[in-house]
Image (cartoon, helix red, strand yellow):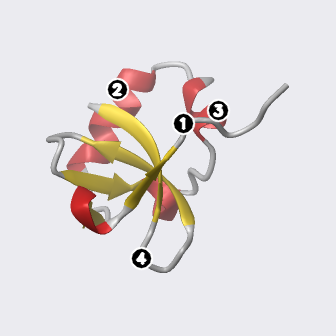
Amino acid sequence: MKLCRFLSTGNQTCVGLSVDGATVLDLTDEGIDRLSSLLEFDGLLGQLQTLAAQGLPRHRVADVRLLAPVDEQE
């Protein structure tokens, strides 16, 4: 599993989870809008496995634009 940020077809910046390298699960529907807040979560691996099993919107990697994995800079 890989976390990423991407620009959706509607030009919205989203946080995603790629489980197979070809598709990205959109975590925005679960209220996850920043990578930094997700990375601070205790039990991250278990949470990601739970999210991957849900029926979240999926996008083909070829249909989205991947963004730099940076939310905020200090």
Mark 3–mark 4 Cα distance, whole angstroms, equals: 23 Å
Mark 3 vs 4, N-terminal side: 4
Q: Which residue is mark 3?
A: 36
Amino acid at circle 3: Ser
Q: Which residue is mark 2?
A: 46
Asked if the residue under mark 1 is in contact with the one under mark 2, i.e. CB atoms within 8 Å, the reply is no
**At 36% across and 64% down in the image, what residue appears?**
64
Callout in the foreground (1, 3): 1
Asked if the residue under mark 2 is in contact with the one under mark 4, i.e. CB atoms within 8 Å, the reply is no
Q: Which numbered circle lies on residue 69?
A: 1
Mark 1–mark 4 Cα distance, whole angstroms, equals: 18 Å
Residue 60 in view, yes or no: no
**At 48% across and 64% down in the image, what residue appears?**
29
Q: Which residue is mark 4?
A: 9
Residue 34: give x, y in percent of width and height.
63, 45
Amino acid at circle 4: Thr
Callout in the foreground (2, 1): 1
Residue 14 or residue 30, whichever sits in front = 14
Callout in the foreground (3, 2): 3
Q: Quadrant of the N terminus?
A: top left
Callout in the foreground (4, 2): 4
Asked if the residue under mark 2 is in contact with the one under mark 3, i.e. CB atoms within 8 Å, the reply is no
